[in-house]
Image: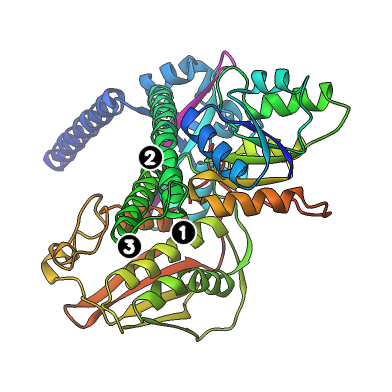
Amino acid sequence: MVKANQDLIEKLEIQAARALEEKANTEALFASIGEGVIATDTEGTIIRINKPALEILGYRKADLIGHWFTEAVVAVNEDGSIVDNQLRPMAKAYLTGRTITERVYYMRKDGTIIPVLANVSPVLMRGKPIGAILIFRDMSEEMQNDRLKMDFIGIASHQLRTPLTAVVTYAHMLEENFGGKLSDIQLSFVNVIITASRRMNELVGTLLNITRIEAGNIRVDPKLVQVENIVTEILDELKPEADSKRIKLNLVIKTELERIKTDKLLVHEVFSNVISNAIKYTPPGGKILVTITDRFNDIVVSVKDNGYGIPVEDQRFIFIKFFRSSDAMKHDVSGTGLGLYLTKILVDNLGGEIWFKSLKNKGTTFFVSLPRSGLERKAGQFTLEI
Amino acid sequence: MAEILIVEDDRDLNNAYKLILEADKHHVISAFDGRQALSKLHSFEPDLILLDLLMPIKSGVEFLRDYGVDHKKKRAKILVFTNLENSPEIDEAFRLGADKCVIKAWTAPHGLVKVVNDVLQPKPNSATS
């Protein structure tokens, strides 16, 4: 009996020592994380906070521990207004049970506002949330760098466009016989200058858009729109291009028409890129079928062509910046390797997905889904350059 | 024939627009920034001002602000000619009385002549972007 008790005491002592060691390890791990970390309980009360978090927010530990997180650490919008508690990443993570990553602005103890990238994960025990962990880092320096990069790109693109405009204008003047009548061969040379300059101008616009989107600086302004109307508008715009290659463009609608809350400008750019790509990569006399359908909670637009197709070995690279398929170059299709990359990041901004299936020499079908539930407005300094 | 003031800082473009509009029998005077444009307006009363937005010394928007205050005699039609797209400067230019805005990189000579003559027509609601 005495022996059994002694064994039990020894076991308990070992377990207690292990628990202490584990606690010390956890504390050390928590303290040594380079980013700010705040842990809350089920009520949203701060139960743990590490040193980087205190440094970023300018508080002492005693100011925050035991306080309700949403009251102690004030989140504000870009314009300085207070963010509604329900819209904060902490509340979203808790309500959805998912990890939420968002750029937010926190007010420091001294009243200054700092941008942070916040990642909040609910802590689950047997499927039920028992608290949340917020990991965040100060984005001030990165945002300052982004601003400088934006300014530079903005100025550079304007500086590039001004001489290009002069090139295009004078080329058009030659084309319209301002410098005397041109021979057919001279006229064909002038047309090459105009086409190449326009391509260069588009490239400048695309680079500008990519830089702005990558920096999270593009405005998303959702309004109620009918996707069918946008697609029809694009098909009308691209008809002359398709006609010049005797390509037939058809539209089929297999869903009930409904309006969704999304950003018209971004959606227009996405489908314009996908359909114009289909025209580029389809030989003369081909067919392009655009279908609008639905899938669960999404509207899905597919663009099917009977063109060159994408070689299997290239398929996993096509959304990568500057990638150009060996086949695209073989067929002498002009391009920059930026179109599908831009399309992909635009679709991401629209909360949708893009995918495709393709068979070499049979054709390609691109699919783009857009959420019916709509989008939240996102503030940004810029809109898209078309 | 109309009296036209071109306000464009790029000399090549300014000259091109002058040649194109003169060929369409308009009387054209050039200015290379907003401040110079305001000073030309002391002795010249144009029917139309072809206005670039991004210019040194005084931008197109700054020009429009001062033009609204200073020039009460005869108000010219304002045709904004810019490479800016979807920009707050364009909204501001319309707020300050611009009649039409055209992207200059895409406008061929016959297009410029057409848009200038359209804006000169005394039509209501001709302001579109």
- The foreground one among A170 and B104 is A170
What chain is tagged by disc 2? Answer: A
* Residue A123 position within the rendered picture, expressed as x and y whole percent measured from the top left: 40, 46
Q: Which residue is mark 1?
A: A269
Around disc 3, counting alpha carbons within 10 Å, would you say few (fewer than 14), some (14 to 19), or many (20 or more)? few
Q: Sequence order check: which comes first, mark 3 or mark 1? A: 3
**Main SS class of the magenta portion in the image:** strand
The CA distance from mark 2 to mark 3 is 41 Å
Instruction: Say above or below: B116 vs A232.
Output: above
Q: Is residue B108 left or right of residue A124?
A: right
The CA distance from mark 3 to mark 1 is 36 Å
For label 2, the SS is helix
Instruction: Classify residue A16 by image quadrant.
Output: top left
Around disc 2, counting alpha carbons within 10 Å, would you say few (fewer than 14), some (14 to 19), or many (20 or more)? some
The reply to whether callout 3 and callout 1 are in contact (CB within 8 Å) is no
What chain is tagged by disc 3? Answer: A
* Residue A200 position within the rendered picture, expressed as x and y whole percent measured from the top left: 34, 46
* Residue A90 position within the rendered picture, expressed as x and y whole percent measured from the top left: 50, 42
Q: Residue at x 17, y 68 (%)?
A: A331
Span colored in magenta: A109-125
For label 1, the SS is helix
* Residue B106 position within the rendered picture, expressed as x and y whole percent measured from the top left: 49, 50
Q: Nearer the viewer, mark 3 or mark 1?
A: 3
Q: Verify whether residue A138 appears in magenta.
A: no
Q: Which residue is mark 3?
A: A184
User: Which labelled disc corresponds to residue A211?
Assistant: 2
Q: Verify whether residue A122 appears in magenta.
A: yes
Circles 2 and 3 on the same subunit: yes
Q: Amino acid at mark 3?
A: Asp
The CA distance from mark 1 to mark 2 is 16 Å
- The foreground one among B74 and A117 is B74
Q: Residue at x 38, y 26 (%)?
A: A142
